[in-house]
Image: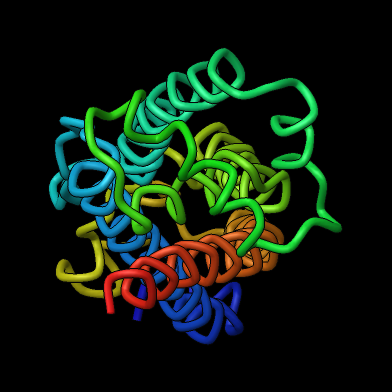
Amino acid sequence: MAQSDFLYPENPRRRQEVNRLHQQLLDCLSDSFHATNKLIGVLNMHLGSTLTSIEMKRDGTIKENCDIIIQAIMNIQKELQKVDEALKDKLEPTLYRKLQDIKERETEKIAIVQKVISVILGEATSAASAVAVKLVGSNVTTGIINKLVTVLAQIGASLLGSIGVAVLGLGIDMIFRAILGAVEKTQLQAAIKSYEKHLVEFKSASEKYHHAITEVTDMVKHQMK
């Protein structure tokens, strides 16, 4: 038991709580890495991108890992922007507007993209058209991706940003030296509140992001049957 535990008897319970919340944060980070790599794989295979997959930096901080995902997503968005600009250039204005219309059926949008995708990519596949529709022609997907970037940036800039992702393997006391440099009651409470606040948003954004990417991969599989 740490010496300050005699002054703050609730600290051991708070340590366990921060440990649990830290693991949940790492789980969300890991899921975001996995989903981003799935998306990179889809773009490389079907849109001719040459993006590099990403790995969690186990000896890095939470901020460093958030930044890795943010940079990867920014690279993805650049690729999607190229496709969007090409579609806007090749399609008639009325058809391009239909791609942005949430009321328009996805099958219709895929048919529209199919008209020009071969000119853009050099080949025409229904899977490529589906990817373009789902990622370029969907404001919902764009919003989900942007939300994840915002949440990751907020976490990186918060109290949690400087914490190492690997501190769990150091033992509970070492975690709190790494996180807080002390075990005072107010600091532990601040850590718990920060974890809880960011986890609520991160879990929601991460789950929606993962679901959106799964929808893309499922649509691609359907088109390839």
In this rendering, position of residue 64 left or right of residue 116: left
Q: Position of residue 168 (x, y in %)?
A: 24, 69
The spot of residue 169 in percent (x, y) is: 15, 70
Determine the image quadrant of residue 32: bottom left
Q: Residue furthest front?
A: 115
Does 172 appear above or below 141?
below
Residue 142 in sight in this render: yes
Please tell me whether residue 43 is drawn above or below residue 58 in the rendered image. above
Up the image or down, 54 lies above or below 30; here it is: above
Would you identify the image quadrant in which residue 108 lies?
A: bottom right
Q: Residue at x 28, y 79 (%)?
A: 225
Nearest to the observer: residue 37 or residue 150: 37
| Residue 198 locus on image (x, y percent) | 64, 57
Q: Nearer the viewer, residue 184 or 75?
A: 75
Could you tell me which residue is drawn at 78 percent across and 32 percent down?
97
Instruction: Count every numbered label the image shows and give the total.
Output: 0
Q: Residue pushed farthest right?
A: 103
**Among all residues in the image, which is located at the extreme top?**
89
Asked if residue 177 shows in the view, the reply is no
How far from the left and from the top, in percent, is residue 157?
55, 32
Q: How is the image coloured?
A: rainbow
Dividing the image into 4 quarters, which one contains the N terminus? bottom left
